[in-house]
Amino acid sequence: MTDLPQLQHPRFTRMYVRISAESELRGTAEHRDHALVGRAGR
């Protein structure tokens, strides 16, 4: 099992926010929407 506190690094969090925002603009949302058509859940 992974150690959760090691995954909660503030630098990673700040970088992930920037990277994911750019990724969304480049089409990730469209790919995700296509992959999840007909799916439901939490």
Image (cartoon, grey):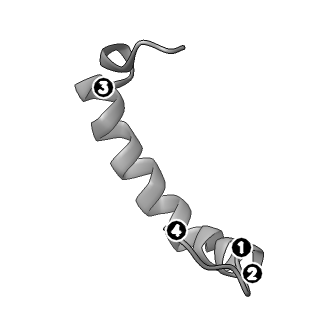
Q: Of the residues under marks 3 and 4, which one precedes in the sequence? A: 3
Above or below: residue 2 compared with residue 26: above
Mark 4 lies on residue? 24
> Could you tell me which secondary element the residue under label 3 belongs to?
loop
Q: Position of residue 33 (x, y in %)?
A: 65, 80
The disc placed on residue 34 is 2
> Could you tell me which secondary element the residue under label 2 belongs to?
helix
Q: Report the amino acid beneath label 1.
A: His
Callout 2–callout 3 Cβ contact below 8 Å: no
Q: CA distance from mark 1 to mark 3?
A: 27 Å
The disc placed on residue 31 is 1
Q: CA distance from mark 1 to mark 4?
A: 10 Å
> Could you tell me which secondary element the residue under label 1 belongs to?
helix
Task: Using residue 37 as the reference point, say whether residue 13 is left or right of it.
Answer: left
Q: CA distance from mark 3 to mark 4?
A: 22 Å
Q: Report the amino acid beneath label 4.
A: Glu
Q: Nearer the viewer, mark 4 or mark 2?
A: 2
Q: As drawn, which residue projects farthest toward the front? A: 41
Q: CA distance from mark 2 to mark 3?
A: 30 Å
Q: Of the residues under marks 4 and 2, which one precedes in the sequence? A: 4
Q: Report the amino acid beneath label 2.
A: His
User: In the image, what residue occupies the spot 39% across and 22% down?
Assistant: 7
Task: Using residue 31 as the reference point, say whether residue 24 is left or right of it.
Answer: left
User: In the image, what residue occupies the spot 51% across and 72% down?
Assistant: 25
Mark 3 lies on residue? 8
State which quadrant residue 29 falls in. Answer: bottom right
Q: Which image quadrant: the N terminus? A: top right
Callout 1–callout 4 Cβ contact below 8 Å: no
